[in-house]
Amino acid sequence: MTTRWLTTILILAGALVPTGSAALAQAMKVDADVPTYHATRSVAGSLNSVGSDTMNNLMTLWAEGFRRVHPSVKVQIEGKGSSTAPPALISGTAQLGPMSRRMKAAEIDAFEKKFGYKPLEIRAAVDALAVYVNKDNPIERLTIEQVDAIFSKTRKCGATQPIDRWGQLGLTGSWAGKPISLYGRNSASGTYGYFKKHALCKGDFKDTVKEQPGSASVVQGVTEDLYGIGYSGVGYRTSGVKAVALSKDGKEFHGVEPESVYSGKYPLARFLYIYVNRPPNQPLDPLTREFLRYVLSRAGQEVVIKDGYLPLHAKLVARELAKLD
Amino acid sequence: MPLARRIPPGTRQPGGEPRRIRGTTARRRLAADRFGRWLVAAGGVGIIATILGILLFILIEVWPLFGGARVEPLAGVRDARLDPAALVIDEYRTHAVSLDRDGRVRIVDLERGVVDDELPLAGDVGAPDGPPTALAPVSGRPVVAGGFADGRVVVRTVSFAISFDDTGRRLVAPEVSAPTVLAAPGTEGRTVVRLAVAASPAGDELAVAAAWADGTLHVFHTTREENDFTGEVETSVEDRPLEPLAGGPPAALAVSARGERVLAATADGRLALYEAGDPRPSSVSGPGAPVTALTWLVGDRAAVVGRKDGAIEVWFPIRDRGETRSRIVFVRAFPPRDAPIAVLAPSLRNKGFVALDRGGGAGLYHSTSRRTLWRGEAGEAARTLVLAPRADGLLVGGSGQLALWRVDNPHPEISLGTLFGKVWYEGYPGPAWVWQSTGGTDDAEPKLSLVPLLVGTLKGTFYSLILAIPIGVLGAMYASQFMHPRLRNAVKPVVEIMAALPSVVLGFLAGLWLAPLIQRVFPGLLLTLVLVPLAVIAAGAVWHRLPARLRHRVPDGLEVVAFAAAIVAAMWLSFELSPWVESMVFGGSFPDWIHAVSGIPYDQRNAVIVGIAMGFAVIPIIFSVAEDAFSNVPRTLISGSLALGASRWQTVTRIVLPTASPGIFSAVMIGFGRAIGETMIVLMATGNTPIMSWFPFNGFRTLSANIAVEIPEAPYGGTLYRTLFFSALLLFALTFVINTVAEVVRQRLRGRYADL
């Protein structure tokens, strides 16, 4: 439980720093066609959520909002990494499994072995994985090939030389000779897996990447380390770090602005998922269903913006809501 | 309790039986005595039993890692029409699709044992004359392909629709897609002689490599991409001609799911690797026995090659530093089989594969661990085989029959070689010790070498003990032999309270506060090593020259309070001088200087930080136990030594230190045990980087921190879960051996000084 305690500390530490995502929040609005939440029935009981650390704050905010409508519901949230969600769903210790990546086939196998059917996947929000550098770092943009050469020892995206000094990225003066200090997530994290798949082209991380137990401590590490670079969900952005613009092909660079994420031009955009256990041909447990309906409502998607992530489009919301019936 | 005086068991009164004492009080006392003895014995036995129980539990969890695979028959289908060249099976092992040599696709219900349906591969796309001239061997993916005499290639994908009936029973309905015809310009009317097909796990990408009779080679790549955000669907077909091989059409072909890597075998057993962006092969290997079977393993980064002489080999494309194209390199070989290899089929769940030879022998192998997990007979009639998508079934097809086998193969990737030896992983330039247990994808190759973790454990222990042993032992020596008793009575509890600091707090402070601080003032820290001893010597000299009247007013052993001021002043001076030293000696920046000198970059969270933080946890333990050892030296010895004219310093170094040495040794060993098992401090104050380096200014990853980091994500009973238990066993064994050696040494020392 000590790590959980730690995560709490780190989250608090992160919360004290004024968030840069507030600017983002003002600019964003939820699609007008996203339905508002009406309680179809009153529910009570307790909900447990085990899974992604990226979605920890998001789940907490959703739970708060949901409890405003259904005060007698208790929600417990634990976020140590996406890989902790499938075991919790299988053992039944959690009804909600937030994950920042899709379940792997082996995880679905294990679920199916126990229940005989596959878990239900609900897309709950949109995240852009940001590559952060210290706020005083002059670098503005990177290609995925460069990111791969910085973080990976296998360089599967195609770079011919590893990059370990800032000078290799075109920085001059006192920066040129400075070694790049790498921060990343622990392997339980969905962010780790997503980054490995999309930014390292399925390659392997360098052994010198410092693995941090949470997204907030990656950001904290880069804030404290002038020559640091790290990655985490855009919701954890603070004023101490800067998210660099990225490019797939080296021609067009895109920052983590909503337009480039929605158009699919930002290379590290992804969905955030909530997995639930729903037997085939049977209705979803009413409490879980109400919670997910809340998540997929206007209020729920406004919470997404508040936490620094991006909301779903009305079309997607409708598609996800249909999965609940 | 290493310091407890041991009372020889069964001490008896001289004269045999203990004397009976009359009276109720005595009887009660005897009963209490018996009860006490029983309680202590029960407690002792209980502790031993618990430890053995933990050991047994760990052993039970670890044991299955080293077991092989079990393969047993499950179902069979007989139908004279079947003559499979390639097979597809669904993930529930209920249905199979057989691409038969007569050019027809047959759907087989494995549970009922009948052929449900059949249709011609080419369908109604203008059926070419005659049966296919080439059929793609199994790829493990739900796709079949055939080539015809008119030069066309026909591809069909298979999907299995899942539904549930009212009773909750699962229904699987196989569906074969409409045929896709692939034709390359200039190949019309030429016979297709060799084909290979591959598909991505999601089925959105498909690649076909084809060879025609005149040696022409083409690779087709079709993609179907749906943008999740805009909902647009894009489909595209790309046709890429490849330069023909010398010596006619290839003997075998393999293609990756994206079509970016094609491997072709020449008639004289060479392997040619084609990569995207270049029609010429980027590398051709040396000759060998003719290649009879060829496939990529899952992930398309390693190829398995089967040869006519029964050899089974693994080859990697390796891209060297500074190169844009890869070479194809031989990596490892498996024990050869007696007959030519007929078919190789990859597992979709791990880096394993199955092989079938022309003599009907089958085998299950794993590339990374180099293990042969199972060998068996598939029968003379066997022509092809495929692993089920979950690698839990093996479907063998022969003329007129299909046989389904159940495969139970829980931990193929583990062997002593992968845990402790150097392993050549996919995409690496050579064999290495690597820990990187998971990836976000199914085709990631787990890298489970415990060597970097063992090195990290020893590194962390080493750097914390070189700080903790001198301070702890010398501090204890000073406190017990020189310090004023009143001061000692205050100091000892304070030091012991230090041990009560939660290690998570120490780790947190070390990682977030100490690490950036040390980076700034490390030269100052080095300076304290020089200035503090100088300050103490100087203070001693000054003290010596003070008038005796003044000196005698301070009780013996309380001078230290006066010295403390000098020490604090020296430290303050050190840190004040730090920027000056940094610019004079280290050229302005110590991290840059050490990087330039050693070639290894300075890492903010490094072994020195952990040494200091862990020192905080270990010093109190060493101090406390060592202080007891010093204090337990009989006063008579010390008095005798002093009476014979030895100075206090002589007495301490020549009499007290040797006599107390068994206890000091225990103190060090207990400190060692604490350091080796410490988790939270290293977890938080290092970056948990699994590197193999003894350099003090970079991090490491210990066995214990690794368990803490990875156990929540390890699925119960999975390979990672059991490997973590294995590392726990290793830690257990390590501390057990160290404690045993320590105890033996301590007893020896004690024997030597027992006469004093």
Image: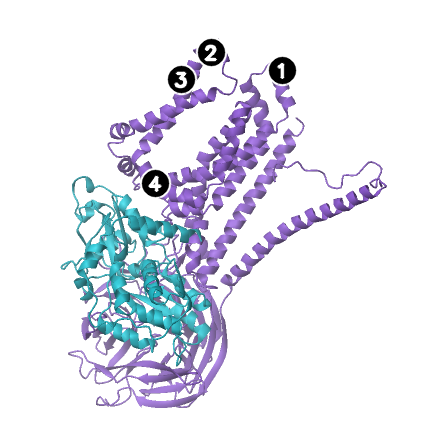
Disc 2 or 1, which lies upstream in sequence? 2
Within-10-Å neighbours for mark 1: few <14, some 14–19, many 20+ = few
Residue A188 position (above or below residue B73): above
- Nearer the observer, A67 or B218: A67
Numbered disc in front, either 1 or 4: 4
Return the disc, 1 or 4, that comes first in the chain's sequence: 4
Mark 4 vs mark 2, CA separation in Å: 43 Å
Label 1: chain? B
- Amino acid type of the residue that numbered disc 1 sits on in the rendered structure: Ala
Chain B tint as drawn: purple
Looking at the rendered structure, the secondary structure element under dot 1 is: helix
- In the rendered view, does B706 fall on the left or right side of A12? right
Q: Residue furthest left?
A: A251
Residue B196: mark in rendering: none
**Badge number at residue B513:** 4
Q: What chain is tagged by disc 4?
A: B
Q: Position of residue B689 (x, y in %)?
A: 36, 49
